[in-house]
């Protein structure tokens, strides 16, 4: 998919919803981020290290276990959840990674949700609800 299509989709979603910030993983994102920035959409680089992803990963896990986040039976989201492994370091910090046994495994949607949670936790006064949705 072309990053112009993706940026148009994100711009449309930002116009439709009260988006405060769009978090992104910097890997291969320069062109897309530039387009969003030019459109006046607030963007935030979210590192993929343990220190950054631990807290939002634990928060997402808690909400899933409490059934406060659901994917409404969407098979693609269920497939990605099934591809996730939780990596825990010696200090009890966690982050999600894909199951390396299956090279076709994808977890991008789950990581995107964790990035969104990172942004929400960094800006608690910006949000009154946890508006996560599955497409």
Image (cartoon, grey):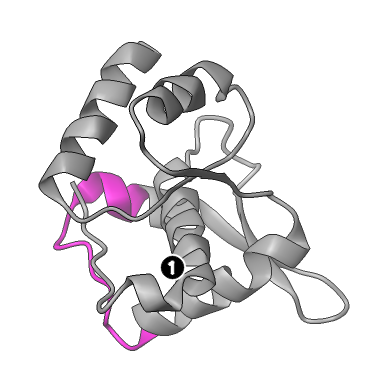
Most foreground residue, 99 or 93: 93
| Magenta highlight on residue 70 | yes
Considering only vertical position in the picture, is 92 above or below 131? below
Element under label 1? helix
Name the residue: 50% across, 38% down.
105
Name the residue: 49% across, 21% down.
34
Name the residue: 63% across, 33% down.
26
Q: Position of residue 61 (x, y in %)?
A: 47, 76
Q: Position of residue 102 (x, y in %)?
A: 57, 37
Quadrant (top left/top right/bottom left/bottom right) for the N terminus: top left
Most foreground residue, 51 or 125: 125
Label 1 neighbour load within 10 Å: few <14, some 14-19, many 20+: many
From where the camera sits, is residue 58 visible?
yes
Instruction: Tell whether 1 sits left or right of 135.
Output: right
- Outermost residue, bottom side: 66
- Outermost residue, right side: 90
Range of the magenta residues? 65-79
| Magenta highlight on residue 19 | no
Instruction: Tell whether 18 sits left or right of 57.
Output: left
Main SS of the magenta part reads: loop
Considering only vertical position in the picture, is 23 above or below 56? above
Identify residue for label 1. 120
Q: Position of residue 55 (x, y in %)?
A: 62, 75
Considering only vertical position in the picture, is 73 above or below 8? below
From where the camera sits, is residue 1 visible?
no
Instruction: Tell whether 113 sits left or right of 59.
Output: left
């Amino acid at each position: 998919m072309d990053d112009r299509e993706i940026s148009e989709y994100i711009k449309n979603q930002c116009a439709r919803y009260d988006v405060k910030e769009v978090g992104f993983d910097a890997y291969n994102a320069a062109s897309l981020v530039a387009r969003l920035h030019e459109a006046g959409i607030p963007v935030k680089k979210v590192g993929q290290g343990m220190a950054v992803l631990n807290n939002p990963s634990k928060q997402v896990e808690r909400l899933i276990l409490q059934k406060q986040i659901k994917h409404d039976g969407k098979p693609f989201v269920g497939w990605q959840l099934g591809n996730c492994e939780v990596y825990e370091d010696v200090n009890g910090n966690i982050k999600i990674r894909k199951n390396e046994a299956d090279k076709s495994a994808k977890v991008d949607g789950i990581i995107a949700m964790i990035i969104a949670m990172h942004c929400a936790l960094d800006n608690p006064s910006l949000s009154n609800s946890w508006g996560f949705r599955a497409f």
